[in-house]
Amino acid sequence: MKVLLATLLLCSLLLSCSVLQPAMAQPRSSSCEGKCRARCSKAAVWERCFKYCGVCCEECKCVPSGTYGNKHQCPCYRDKLNNKGKPKCP
Protein backbone atom coordinates (compact mmCIF):
# COMPACT_ATOMS: atom_id res chain seq x y z
CA MET A 1 0.00 0.00 0.00
CA LYS A 2 2.80 2.44 0.90
CA VAL A 3 4.60 1.69 -2.38
CA LEU A 4 1.45 2.36 -4.37
CA LEU A 5 0.85 5.65 -2.54
CA ALA A 6 4.46 6.73 -3.02
CA THR A 7 4.29 5.86 -6.73
CA LEU A 8 1.08 7.84 -7.18
CA LEU A 9 2.56 10.80 -5.34
CA LEU A 10 5.70 10.72 -7.48
CA CYS A 11 3.68 10.45 -10.70
CA SER A 12 1.45 13.35 -9.74
CA LEU A 13 4.50 15.46 -8.86
CA LEU A 14 6.15 14.72 -12.19
CA LEU A 15 2.94 15.40 -14.08
CA SER A 16 2.36 18.74 -12.34
CA CYS A 17 5.95 19.82 -13.07
CA SER A 18 5.62 18.99 -16.74
CA VAL A 19 2.34 20.92 -16.98
CA LEU A 20 3.36 24.00 -14.98
CA GLN A 21 6.86 24.55 -16.31
CA PRO A 22 5.88 25.54 -19.88
CA ALA A 23 3.32 28.00 -18.55
CA MET A 24 5.86 29.62 -16.26
CA ALA A 25 8.67 29.69 -18.82
CA GLN A 26 6.76 31.92 -21.26
CA PRO A 27 8.89 31.25 -24.30
CA ARG A 28 9.58 34.31 -26.43
CA SER A 29 10.62 34.58 -30.02
CA SER A 30 14.22 35.67 -30.40
CA SER A 31 13.20 38.92 -32.10
CA CYS A 32 10.91 39.85 -29.19
CA GLU A 33 13.58 38.92 -26.68
CA GLY A 34 16.18 41.16 -28.31
CA LYS A 35 13.80 44.08 -28.75
CA CYS A 36 12.58 43.82 -25.16
CA ARG A 37 16.12 43.61 -23.78
CA ALA A 38 16.87 46.88 -25.55
CA ARG A 39 13.55 48.46 -24.51
CA CYS A 40 14.00 47.52 -20.84
CA SER A 41 17.76 48.08 -20.60
CA LYS A 42 17.34 51.16 -18.39
CA ALA A 43 14.24 50.04 -16.47
CA ALA A 44 14.37 50.23 -12.67
CA VAL A 45 12.42 46.96 -12.39
CA TRP A 46 13.97 45.09 -15.31
CA GLU A 47 12.25 41.71 -14.81
CA ARG A 48 8.74 43.21 -14.78
CA CYS A 49 9.52 45.41 -17.80
CA PHE A 50 10.92 42.45 -19.72
CA LYS A 51 7.95 40.24 -18.84
CA TYR A 52 5.28 42.70 -19.97
CA CYS A 53 7.25 43.84 -22.99
CA GLY A 54 7.47 40.20 -24.08
CA VAL A 55 3.74 39.66 -23.63
CA CYS A 56 2.97 42.79 -25.63
CA CYS A 57 5.51 41.96 -28.34
CA GLU A 58 4.10 38.48 -28.85
CA GLU A 59 0.55 39.85 -29.14
CA CYS A 60 1.34 42.98 -31.18
CA LYS A 61 4.33 41.69 -33.20
CA CYS A 62 6.22 44.94 -32.58
CA VAL A 63 8.08 46.91 -29.90
CA PRO A 64 8.70 50.67 -30.08
CA SER A 65 12.33 51.73 -30.51
CA GLY A 66 14.31 53.24 -27.67
CA THR A 67 14.04 52.70 -23.93
CA TYR A 68 11.03 54.98 -23.37
CA GLY A 69 8.29 56.59 -25.42
CA ASN A 70 7.96 56.20 -29.20
CA LYS A 71 4.78 54.18 -28.67
CA HIS A 72 3.26 55.83 -31.75
CA GLN A 73 5.43 53.39 -33.75
CA CYS A 74 3.29 50.47 -32.54
CA PRO A 75 -0.37 51.39 -31.89
CA CYS A 76 -1.29 47.92 -30.59
CA TYR A 77 1.54 48.10 -28.03
CA ARG A 78 0.52 51.66 -27.11
CA ASP A 79 -3.19 50.88 -26.67
CA LYS A 80 -2.97 47.76 -24.47
CA LEU A 81 -4.29 48.46 -20.96
CA ASN A 82 -4.05 46.49 -17.73
CA ASN A 83 -7.10 45.72 -15.56
CA LYS A 84 -6.70 49.11 -13.82
CA GLY A 85 -6.95 51.01 -17.12
CA LYS A 86 -3.26 51.96 -17.17
CA PRO A 87 -0.81 51.13 -19.99
CA LYS A 88 0.18 47.47 -19.92
CA CYS A 89 3.22 47.69 -22.14
CA PRO A 90 6.40 49.42 -20.93
Image: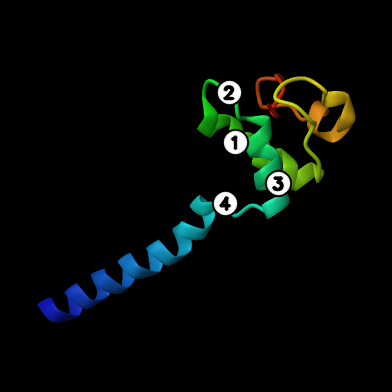
> Percent x, y for residue 77?
79, 33
Give the spatial CA distance, label 4 vs label 3.
12 Å
Residue sitting at x 81%, y 41%: 62
Please state which amino acid type lies under the numbered disc 4. Gln
Residue sitting at x 77%, y 20%: 69
> Percent x, y for residue 78?
81, 27
Residue sitting at x 84%, y 34%: 76
Mark 1 and mark 2 in contact (Cβ < 8 Å)?
A: yes
Give the spatial CA distance, label 2 vs label 3.
17 Å
Give the spatial CA distance, label 2 vs label 4.
20 Å
Quarter occupied by the N terminus? bottom left
Q: Which residue is mark 3?
A: 32
In this rendering, position of residue 24 left or right of residue 76: left
Please state which amino acid type lies under the numbered disc 2. Ala
> Of marks 3 and 1, which one's residue comes earlier in the chain?
3
Mark 1 and mark 4 in contact (Cβ < 8 Å)?
A: no
Mark 4 or mark 3, which is nearer to you?
3
Q: Which residue is mark 2?
A: 43
Please state which amino acid type lies under the numbered disc 3. Cys
Q: Which residue is mark 1?
A: 50
Q: Which residue is mark 4?
A: 26
In this rendering, position of residue 76 left or right of residue 51: right
The secondary structure type at the circle numbered 4 is loop
Quarter occupied by the C terminus? top right
The secondary structure type at the circle numbered 3 is helix
Mark 4 and mark 2 in contact (Cβ < 8 Å)?
A: no
> Of marks 2 and 1, which one's residue comes earlier in the chain?
2
| Front residue (pair 22, 8) | 22
